[in-house]
Every structure is written in structure tokens, then in C-alpha cells.
Image: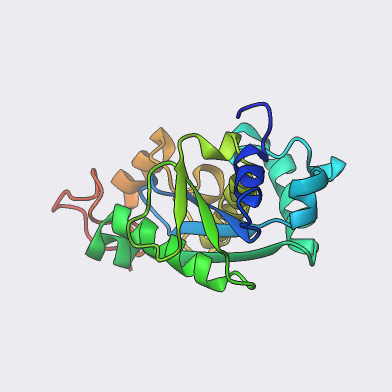
């Protein structure tokens, strides 16, 4: 499977299933910001004849440079044949329902936004029990399926752009640099000025009672 990143898609097409969407998320682990999910349905002709050369090295977003992620994002979003949906769940809701259910909720909403009603979903990692469309969970799917890799890139770039914008709204935390992850610089900023509304209060070390909400 690893040598053919359309193997899962072609197997489904062979069964008569042609509307296939890859689903992935970004931002489950950070201390701040939303979790973002994307669902991407690539053109059937790409599955049958091969992905365009400009996207041939499309991969798990974590394996790509920021420049390549942005490049692939623009190609995917700019192609009218690519049908996609992107959704996010904010920190307050994450705290209310937990990060796993928030991730499922973001995935569900992203899938609902995809035009053309996907028939089958290829989901990165573990199954999402709340999805109502038939799914195949693929461990390390973002490196094994072009559809999931495309969703990985859309989710990651969308979230990174959001965190960069939030850096201007909530200065001093370094969101543009670490995107909300628990880096040493981020933890130092938390110790210095406390959390802001973007922070997930249910996440350690934000559960500490002495931390007071910023602003």
C-alpha cells in the first residue's frame, strides 16, 4: 500500500465507489487554539490516471516544510475539481466535551461541507464512531493515501494561519511560532502572563487553579 498512495482509493473504485473523501485533523495536542479537521474528495480522474505532477510529493503535513504545505494548499484550494470541507472546534468547546469528541465533531462538520456527498471516507488513524458515512480507518493514513494527505495539509495550513492571526490578537505568547503547542517558550509565557481565552483549560498544565484567565 505504501508505494501507491491511491491504493485505498482504487480498491474502492473497483467496488463501484467513486466519491471518496480523505479526512484528517490538526491540533489535537496543543495547549491553545482550535482543533481543525478537513475532508477532501480528489477528482476520480486523478485516482484512475494519477495525481498531477505538482502534487506528486503530497504527504503527511508533518513531513512537509511550511513552504510546501502552503504550496499544496493553494493548489488544492484553487482547483475546482477538488471538493473539500474544513471545520474547527474552539477551545471552550474542547474543554466542555473533551478533545477526542471535539475532533470527531470537527471531522463530522468538515465532511458535511464537502459538495457531492461522499460515499466512503478514508479516516486517518482511528475510526470516528460519530460519522454517519461508511469509513475506513487507516493508521498513518496521511502518508499512505493522497486523499488523507490532502486533508492533512488543508487542516494544518488552516490552523497555522489561524494561530498566526491570533498571535496579533493575543501578543506575548508566541502563537505564530509554536502554534499553541507546549514549547518551553509557551510555558514561560503562561507562567509570566497566565492563559488567554484561546487556552484549553482542561489541559495540563492549565488545570492549575492559580492560573487566572487573561483579560
Vertical arrangement, residue 58 with respect to residue 41, above or below: above
Give the camera-side residue of 121 and 189.
121
**Front one among 82 and 182:** 82
Task: Look at the picture and state if 132 lies above or below 44.
Answer: below
Residue, far left:
209
User: In this rendering, would 157 be left or right of 207?
Assistant: right
Chosen colour scheme: rainbow
Residue at image point 80% right, 54% down: 45
Name the outermost residue toward the right. Answer: 53
Looking at the picture, how far across and down is residue 168, in whole percent?
55, 61
Residue at horizontal 79 percent and vertical 67 percent from the top: 80
Q: In which quarter of the image is residue 159?
A: bottom right
At x 39%, y 62%, the residue is: 131
Which residue is at the far top?
3
Q: x and y percent of residue 13 in the render?
A: 65, 51
From this viewpoint, is residue 148 visible?
yes
Count of number-bearing discs = 0
- Furthest-front residue in this view: 15
Determine which quarter of the picture holds residue 11: top right
Residue found at x 79% / y 63%: 78
Task: Give 170 or 79, whichever is nearer the viewer.
Answer: 79
Asked if 37 appears above or below 179 in the picture, the reply is: below
Residue 89 seen by the camera = no
Q: In which quarter of the image is the N terminus?
A: top right
Q: Where is residue 49 in the image (x, y as percent from the top left)?
A: 82, 45
- In this image, 75 relative to 168: left or right? right
For the C terminus, give its image quadrant: bottom left
Q: Position of residue 33 (x, y in %)?
A: 42, 57
Amino acid at each position: 500500500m505504501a508505494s501507491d498512495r491511491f491504493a485505498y482509493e482504487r480498491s474502492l473504485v473497483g467496488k463501484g465507489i467513486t466519491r471518496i473523501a480523505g479526512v484528517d485533523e490538526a491540533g489535537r495536542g496543543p495547549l491553545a487554539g482550535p482543533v481543525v479537521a478537513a475532508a477532501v474528495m480528489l477528482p476520480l480522474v486523478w485516482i484512475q490516471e494519477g495525481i498531477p505532477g505538482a502534487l506528486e510529493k503530497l504527504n503527511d503535513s508533518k513531513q512537509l516544510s511550511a513552504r510546501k504545505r502552503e504550496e499544496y494548499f493553494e493548489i488544492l484550494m484553487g482547483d475546482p475539481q477538488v471538493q473539500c470541507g474544513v471545520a474547527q472546534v474552539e477551545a471552550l468547546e474542547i474543554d466542555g466535551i473533551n478533545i477526542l469528541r471535539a475532533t470527531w465533531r470537527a471531522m463530522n462538520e468538515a465532511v458535511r461541507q464537502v459538495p457531492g456527498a461522499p460515499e466512503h471516507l478514508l479516516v486517518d488513524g482511528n475510526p470516528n464512531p460519530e460519522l454517519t458515512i461508511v469509513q475506513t480507518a487507516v493508521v498513518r493514513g496521511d502518508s499512505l493515501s493522497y486523499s488523507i494527505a490532502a486533508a492533512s495539509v488543508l487542516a494544518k495550513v488552516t490552523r497555522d494561519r489561524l494561530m498566526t492571526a491570533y498571535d496579533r490578537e493575543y501578543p506575548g505568547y508566541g502563537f505564530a511560532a509554536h502554534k499553541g503547542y507546549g514549547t518551553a517558550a509557551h510555558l514561560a509565557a503562561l507562567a509570566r502572563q497566565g492563559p488567554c481565552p484561546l487556552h484549553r483549560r482542561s489541559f495540563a498544565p492549565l488545570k492549575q487553579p492559580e492560573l487566572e484567565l487573561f483579560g
